[in-house]
Image (cartoon, grey):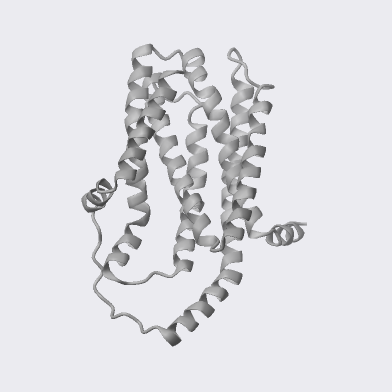
Amino acid sequence: MASQLLACLSSLPIAVVYGSLSLFISILHNVFLLYYVDTFVSVYKIDKLSFWIGETIFLIWNSLNDPLFGWLSDRAFLSTQQSGIEISSPEVVLKRLRALNHNGPLFALSFLAFWIAWAHPGLQFLICLCLYDSFLTMVDLNQNALLADLAVSAKDRTGLNFYSSLFSAIGSLSVFMSYAVWNKEDFFSFRIFCMALALSSAVGFIVATWLLRQRFQSEGQVKWDERAALKELYIDKPSVQQVKRITLSEYLKQLSRHRNFLWFVSMNLIQVGVAWYSL
């Protein structure tokens, strides 16, 4: 039975497996957006001062962690690009998959931390928000970057985007299911529901990344090896230079020179601020 299930999963198209990652994100994130404020205000009875302090710190962290985690994720690739050393796409894809394999279950665990009281409400609110947003950023960053690495043609990317959007829409069903168990007076059933969602998401990330890695190593690696062999026939290899690691300050300095990035960060700060303070 297990071997049949494994064979069935292994036969799924890469686009379907990639799209399923959006399902494992959306089943948690939609529930989080709907209930986390109500949980801390109505169930944990957080005071107003602690709530707004937590939201303000989270607002700042949410605006800063995108470029920070982008640098942490790609600093090795940024350094090799500056030194003229080429990194093959298979190496990039496998790195993305390892990151999703590690951060996906941690994202599910950070989601679960909201629904179990384990500290003072104000402290738990701040820690849970920052941890959850950190792992969500890492998962989103690597999933979106993986799209460009897995598909080169516009047709293939359209297929990946289609299944990603489809599974994201399916994941929103978790919100409708949550109405059956949400009860401020008796929180036990909702906690069990969230534990089931978190477990499903964590297992889903592990299985999906494993399937993508197996499929890519068996199919994608052959294609890239053929391309590399053809490239060597026509292009001389560049001389190997010493790799210079780019620092965070250099990375931020480079970003600060891009006007589009500054506009993006400013608008993101305003958008997130309006969204949180309107709750």
Q: Residue furthest front?
A: 259
**Residue 60, how many percent across, how many down?**
32, 31
Q: Quadrant of residue 194?
A: top right
Residue at x 68%, y 61% (from the top left corner): 10
Q: Nearer the viewer, residue 81 or 270?
A: 270
Look at 25% across and 46% down and name the residue there. 256
On the image, the x and y values in percent for residue 68 come to: 32, 45
Q: Quadrant of residue 261?
A: top left
Please tell me which residue lies in front, 116 or 41.
Answer: 41
Q: Residue at x 51, y 52 (%)?
A: 101
Task: Give the camera-side residue of 53 and 111.
Answer: 53
The quadrant in which the N terminus is found is bottom right
Q: Residue at x 61, y 44 (%)?
A: 165
Q: Is residue 104 left or right of residue 178?
A: left
Q: Position of residue 89 (x, y in %)?
A: 46, 67
User: As displayed, is residue 26 above or below residue 273?
Assistant: below
In this picture, is 214 found above or below 65?
below
Say left or right for 223 vs 1.
left
* Image position of 9 with respect to 272: above or below: below
How many numbered callouts?
Answer: 0
